[in-house]
Amino acid sequence: MHDYEAQAQAFSEQIEAELEDGRLNFPTALDVSLRIKRMADDPNSSLDDIANVVKAEPVLSAKAVRMANAVMLNPYGTQIADVGTAVKRIGLAALRCLAFAVSAEQLAQDHRSKHMRLIASGLWMHSVDVASWSYAFAHQLRTVAPDRAMFAGMMVDIGQFFLLARASSYPALEENLERFAEFVEVWSEPVGRAILEAFELPEEVLDAFEYENPYGGAWPPATLGDIVFVASLAAESPNPFDSVLGVQRRPEMLENCIAGIEADKFEELVNQAREMRQAMLATVCG
């Protein structure tokens, strides 16, 4: 089957079925697993160093937090919502097994074309950028734990990551990236919400993704959701799907369509947080 319409319909039906069953299968990158293994074997690497690598992969981050909140590892029920604490709680042995299991899942499904790999690379970079700004803003404003903000920032594109990974089974979709971007725009929100809920993330993280009302309207941003939203505006690496569709996300739109955020105050916060963002970006991408 190589017809776009037929494959798009089949993909839609598959997504609907998985959402209804509550079983979403999301692969992740093998190189993350290998980096974690190498660092775990290196006596000079700390748990914080390893946690920074985990933070760069949204699915592994979510699963690590979920594992840390499991009863066997968290008998007193204290909710863990940041990756650093999760890594320390679950330990290196469990983390390496988790990373390998997630990576092996992708190896069975990942047959993306060159075009799709470029889209995936750009989407990953955008997520890391948003996460780094989230961390920097939280550090600057001191209203939300920076590690928690970074974790939430990595989740902003998780629905799109899922759709990209699964699109390898529908090769006709790559033949028209604009139409595929429109397809992703339709499905990314319900898929992203389902993934976040399936991972049983803490309510604070889930509440940060209020798609119908993404920003509370006050300045400076005080909640986790507001910080992630502002970080998405600050991101300098564009979301590749937005670029394909010609959607503008940069601060030039602030005064016209987002109440409560003045462009000069936004730029002041960006300038104050830029050095911290650069440091975190280098840490995650290095």
Image (tube, rainbow, N blue to C red):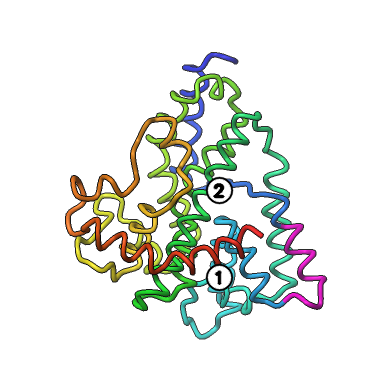
Q: Pick the residue in front: 133 or 268.
A: 268
On whether residue 37 falls in the magenta region, the answer is yes
Q: Picture coordinates of residue 168 (x, y %)?
A: 62, 31
Q: Which picture quadrant has residue 230? A: bottom left
Left/right of residue 222 with respect to residue 286 in the rendered view: left
Q: Pick the residue in front: 22 or 242.
A: 242
Q: Residue furthest bottom?
A: 76
What is the spatial separation of the Cα atoms under label 2 and label 1, in whole angstroms?
18 Å
Height in image: 239 above or below 73?
above
Which segment did they paint magenta?
33-45
Q: Count neighbours of disc 2 (C-alpha within 10 A) and say few if under 14, some if 14 to 19, many if 20 or more.
A: many
Residue where numbered disc 2 is placed: 124
Q: Picture coordinates of residue 100 (x, y %)?
A: 73, 57
Residue in the picture at 45% in, 43% down = 238
Q: Which picture quadrant has residue 137? A: bottom left
Residue in the picture at 19% in, 61% down = 217
Residue in the picture at 61% in, 67% down = 52
Residue where numbered disc 1 is placed: 83
Residue in the picture at 57% in, 74% down = 84
On whether residue 172 falls in the magenta region, the answer is no
Identify which amino acid the numbered label 1 is placed on.
Answer: Val
Q: Pick the residue in front: 111 or 41.
A: 41
